[in-house]
Image (cartoon, rainbow, N blue to C red):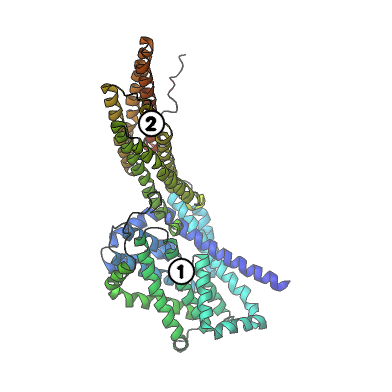
Amino acid sequence: MVAILDMLNIAGAVALLLWGTHMVQTGVQRAFGPRLRTFLARTLKNRLAALLAGISVTTLLQSSTATGLMATAFAADGLVPLVPAMAIMLGANIGTALIVTVLSFNIAILALPLVLLGVLLFRRDTSAMLHDLGRSFIGLGLMILALHQMLTLLQPFEQSRELVTMLGLIATAPLLAIALGAAAAWATHSSVAVVLFVMSLAASRVIPIEPALLLVAGANLGSALNPLLGATAGDPVARRLPLVNLGNRVVGVILAWLLVAPIAEGLAGLHLAGAPAVAAFHLAFNLVLALVALPFLTPLARLAERLVPARPDAEHPGQPIYLDRSARETPIVAIGGAAREALRLADALEVMLIGAREALTRGDRKLIAETRAKDDVLDSLNNAIKEYLSAFDPEDLSDSDQHRLQQILVFAMNMEQAGDVIDRNLLPHASKRLKRGLLPDAGNEAELVEMLDRLIANTRNAASLFVTEDARIARSLAEEKLAFRRAEQMATTSHFAHMRDGISAASQSSALHLDLIRDMKQVNSHIVAAAAYPVLDRVGELLPTRLASPAE
């Protein structure tokens, strides 16, 4: 019973370590996320500057995965070459090792003061940045507290025969130690937490130095798996950087496996043992791999481009391209990808509108059917975006991130609903007109083409507005509703005039014309609601109701 309780306590300490790491990362991302992304973008022109930037940003974020995802996004978007992005990834690996090195010192005395400082800052609701930094300080204090607690809990296990026997198996099976380290880092999404745990085991002499070093090498390998696995379903170009990083880690693991005995002897010769030895090896492992790979980044980039060529042909247009699941650990990258995916909805809606215009002017039933089928693209993309964004924990998002996420959802859903109106109403009405042989007069035909052209232009403006959030464009787009309202009024008046005249064919034709105008008006309403209303509401130019105030 006592042993079970001890194991639960150790598991709790590990959970506290992981949660502390999570709090530090999310706090820094909320406070400096956009600034860190801009800083990385500015340093990507020079590989040495990119290496140093990767070190500094990762030291703040305490996550090489988060830094790597930003660099991957830049490279995949074609904003920068692959070489400087690879340099940032190498720097990110060194940054994680520096974090572990600092935490390897006995700084337990700082744990509670850091938590206190964090709570004081966290309660400062007047400053969003101080609030987020407080979250990071709380997380850092919890990490140090968890490490100290693990050292205390592991001390009784030094003399455990069962544990010594189990660890003896790891000592005699180097590949098992590497596999365990890799699996742990992959499962926890944090090589920092795994290496810190191994340091605790080594400091308590629960595990010999050689298997401890192999566990650390495995943890470095496991941390490189998540970005690659997360990018398998997206753009192939996004897999190049994670693949190069994984290859770099594989080479390092093989060398560590072959040289673990002399490495352990060298550490002992430097009078390093336990946690300091593990930390020194972790830092040297990443530093050496980075310095060796840095001069060869250009040929490595060419090799990656050959192994992972760009997608030659466009896949199904309803298949998401920019929703990288591994990027969800870094909200600013993931939300940016979702925004890019939402713009594809505007492109798909524009294609439907162009198809509807051509079908109406040419009277082509086959083209009507083909255009209606394109609504599946909007449905598929909208569902993918909603599913992707719904996985975010609101606690991990800053206020600006939550605002942008809501904007993306509103934009995507309204674009999809506009496509539904075209598919279920507008095109069936056009098809009905052809089946009945009711051809409109020249004036009505020109009006339909003009209104469809306005819808196409409004869709393009909505996409631009979604990116720029310019209030002037928002006002201009919202004013388009007046044009469609007037067209509906004129079509209604014309229809009732034909009914009074008693001309059956003209009455039926004007009725279908009115239906088409109303459908276009509804499509335009969704376009305006997708992009203009959120911006106007933000700047305080959107009234809560169209009703006039009652007279006193």
The structure residue drawn at horizontal position 39% and vertical position 61%, both measured from the top left corner, is 69
Work out whether mark 2 precedes mark 1 in sequence or the reverse, and give the earlier one: 1
Residue indicated by mark 2? 431
Comparing labels 2 and 1, the label whose residue is closer to the camera? 2
The structure residue drawn at horizontal position 44% and vertical position 48%, both measured from the top left corner, is 385
Residue 28 vertical position relative to residue 275 in the rendered view, above or below: above
Instruction: Tell me if residue 240 can be seen.
Output: yes
Q: Which of these two is toward me, 74 or 54?
A: 74
Q: Is residue 171 left or right of residue 270?
A: right
Q: Is residue 24 left or right of residue 519?
A: right
Image spot of residue 515 (x, y percent): 39, 25
Q: Are marks 2 and 1 in contact (CB under 8 Å)?
A: no
Q: Residue furthest right?
A: 1
The structure residue drawn at horizontal position 38% and vertical position 19%, both measured from the top left corner, is 508
Image spot of residue 402 (x, y percent): 45, 46
Residue 363 vertical position relative to residue 23 in the rendered view, above or below: above
Q: Is residue 96 left or right of residue 455?
A: right
Image spot of residue 210 (x, y percent): 51, 84
Instruction: Residue 52: name its quadrant.
Output: bottom left
Amino acid under disc 1: Ser
Q: CA distance from mark 2 to mark 1?
A: 56 Å
Residue indicated by mark 1? 223
Q: Residues within 10 Å of mark 1 (few under 14, many from 20)?
A: many
The structure residue drawn at horizontal position 36% and vertical position 61%, both measured from the top left corner, is 236
Helix, strand or loop status at disc 2? helix
Amino acid under disc 2: Ser
Residue 78 vertical position relative to residue 169 in the rendered view, above or below: above
Q: Residues within 10 Å of mark 2 (few under 14, many from 20)?
A: some
Total marks shown come to 2
Residue 124 vertical position relative to residue 304 in the rendered view, above or below: above
